[in-house]
Amino acid sequence: MRYAARPNPQDSRRLAGVTGGVPVIASKLHPVVLSGGSGERLWPLSRPQHPKQLLSLISERSMLQETVERIAGLDGCAPPLVVASAEHRFLVADQLQQLGLTSKRIVLEPCGRNTAPAAAVAALVLTAEDPEAVMVLMPADHAVRDRAAFLSALELAREAVAEGFVTFGIRPTRAETGYGYIKRGPALSEAPGLFRVESFVEKPDLATAETYLASGQYLWNSGIFVFSAARYLKELARQRPDILQACRKALEAGTRDQDFIRLDAAVFDTCPSESIDYAVMEKAARVVVIPSDMGWSDVGAWNALWEIAEKDDAANAVLGNCLIQDVQGSYLRSEDGRLVAAIGLADMVVISTKDAVLVAPRSSTMAVRDVVRKLKATETQRKSSA
């Protein structure tokens, strides 16, 4: 599918006016897809050389491709800008090419510095092209099952971006301890469907998450933001000038090679690592949230993948060459063609790849990262003693 504009019955490129009391922004939307991260909790399938955002986990397309396609063809929308690790440059370029993106813009990070610097570099690139650019910041490794609901929220965000920074909050369906939360404040009378953000909240323990769910005031933090690129740079200059300065210098000292914008490694290495929530959003004066039911998941562990997967009558998700008997509520996946036979399992995860097998209760899959870190420590020790 080519990234080409399709007719939209609600043309969002209206000239400056008022809709629901909120000024409409006529600027073009610029999708910025953050393709960093290693996806350690999805080991052994996700590896440093081929992390989860570049894997086909929820469809035949990779999660990066799913993210790009989610906003493809939206009227008044530019081709995406992708911020990725330099290590993955050819994989990213190839996957964008598979979508028919002949004009690719890929910013290459020599090292990971979290979302605030990644957004800063993207904003610097975009404002040089379009001083009025509106960014749609999206992680490449999240799943959204209801695209129509996502686009509906995006349309609302597009019209409300004059209010300040806009984020998408997901209405929680359970007391989840693996997600950050947003506490919503009062509704905006002049913009139905929007609420002031009272606070961003860290991942809670179970008891706290249960109180959040019961209160009805808290939303899961999707990590999806819509804002003016120029406004973000201005706010970053006020709150974290050290991050902005490092990003600006890394971009100026960097190089351009066809579709790639390479940040200077020595300069970018000095940039503080900080999330956009901590660096900007928690202290910004005007942040609003749109509650949504878009079938969102951060696919942060195998249990999260089981939750969104298609299941049989016994609540099993079975992919690849698997034979099961008396199995309930489990996720089984064979990636190497070898037969995985399972008998009498309940609420388990079994993953088989060419060089590793993972077996764990679904409730313990968040601990897979600990296994990965032990493997890394063992490998480091082996190399140092060789």
Image: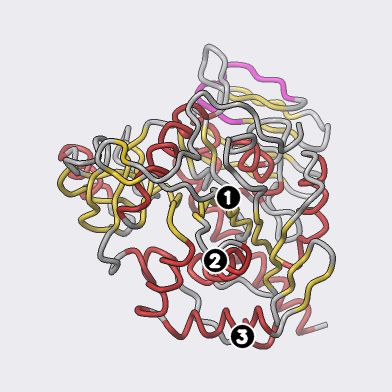
- Judging from the image, what secondary structure is the residue with disc 1 in? strand
Q: Is residue 138 magenta?
A: no
Residue 329, relative to residue 165: is it above or below? above
- Judging from the image, what secondary structure is the residue with disc 2 in? helix
Looking at the rendered structure, the number of numbered marks drawn on it comes to: 3
**Residue found at x 54% / y 48%:** 29
Determine which residue is flagged by label 2.
123
Q: Is 35 placed left or right of 202 in the picture? A: right
Q: Which of 188 and 204 is in front in this view?
A: 188
The quarter of the picture where the N terminus appears is: top right
Residue 100, relative to residue 276: is it above or below? above
The tag on residue 249 is 3
Q: Which of 230 and 338 is in front in this view?
A: 230
Q: Which of 28 and 30 is in front in this view?
A: 28
Q: Is 191 placed left or right of 235 in the picture? A: left
Determine which residue is flagged by label 1.
31
Residue 88 at x, y percent in the picture: 76, 60
Residue projecting furthest to the top? 313
- Residue type at tag 2: Ala
Q: Which of 370 and 216 is in front in this view?
A: 216
**Residue found at x 52% / y 29%:** 147
**Residue found at x 57% / y 79%:** 247
In the image, the segment drawn in magenta is 322-331
How far is disc 1 from disc 2 in space, using C-alphas? 11 Å
Residue 115, relative to residue 23: is it above or below? below
Residue 205, relative to residue 319: is it above or below? below
- Judging from the image, what secondary structure is the residue with disc 3 in? helix
